[in-house]
């Protein structure tokens, strides 16, 4: 699985919320096995848009899309409870 580099605004968000190391760890898991249990990958509503998310930690999730079968782009990182 190839994960495209994230946008600079997302990098800044990770730094601001002290999530850089946790995001990198979860990203490595995603690259190796999208079904790893700690990622808790979800298909978001509406399902026909094919937008997914994975857990960065218990509070934050990263939203991603597939460009090809094995190419992922993280398009957002946000507080799951806001």
Image: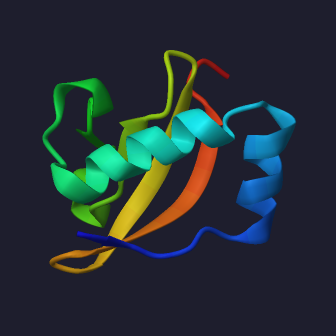
Identify which residue is drawn at 72% across, 57% down. Answer: 10
**Quick one: 12 or 51, which is closer to the camera?**
12
Identify which residue is drawn at 19% across, 76% down. Answer: 70
Task: Using the rendered image of the protein, determine whether residue 56 is visible from the camera's viewpoint.
Answer: yes
Task: Using the rendered image of the protein, determine whether residue 46 is visible from the camera's viewpoint.
Answer: no
User: In this figure, what is the number of numbered marks?
Assistant: 0
Identify which residue is drawn at 13% across, 41% down. Answer: 35
Identify which residue is drawn at 19% across, 49% down. Answer: 34
In the depicted structure, whether residue 44 falls above or below residue 65: above
**Quick one: 53 or 1, which is closer to the camera?**
1
In the depicted structure, whether residue 54 falls above or below residue 31: above
Report the quarter where the N terminus lies: bottom left
Query: What colour scheme does the image use?
Result: rainbow
User: In which image quadrant can residue 69 be found?
Assistant: bottom left
Image position of 21 (left or right of 70): right
User: In which image quadrant can residue 50 be found?
Assistant: bottom left
Instruction: Locate residue 32, reporting x and y percent.
Output: 20, 54
In the depicted structure, whether residue 46 falls above or below residue 26: below
Report the quarter where the C terminus lies: top right
User: In which image quadrant can residue 41 be found?
Assistant: top left
Instruction: Locate residue 21, reporting x and y percent.
Output: 60, 38
Image position of 9 (left or right of 36): right
In the depicted structure, whether residue 41 falls above or below residue 76: above
Instruction: Locate residue 65, reporting x and y percent.
Output: 37, 66
Which residue is at the far bottom? 68
């Amino acid at each position: 699985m190839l994960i495209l580099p994230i946008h600079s605004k997302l990098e800044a968000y990770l730094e601001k919320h002290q999530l850089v190391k946790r995001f990198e760890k979860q990203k490595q898991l995603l690259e190796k096995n999208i079904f790893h249990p700690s990622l808790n990958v979800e298909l978001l509503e509406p399902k026909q848009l094919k937008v997914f998310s994975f857990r960065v930690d218990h509070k934050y999730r990263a939203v991603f899309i597939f460009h090809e079968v094995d190419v992922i782009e993280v398009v957002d990182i946000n507080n799951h409870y806001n």
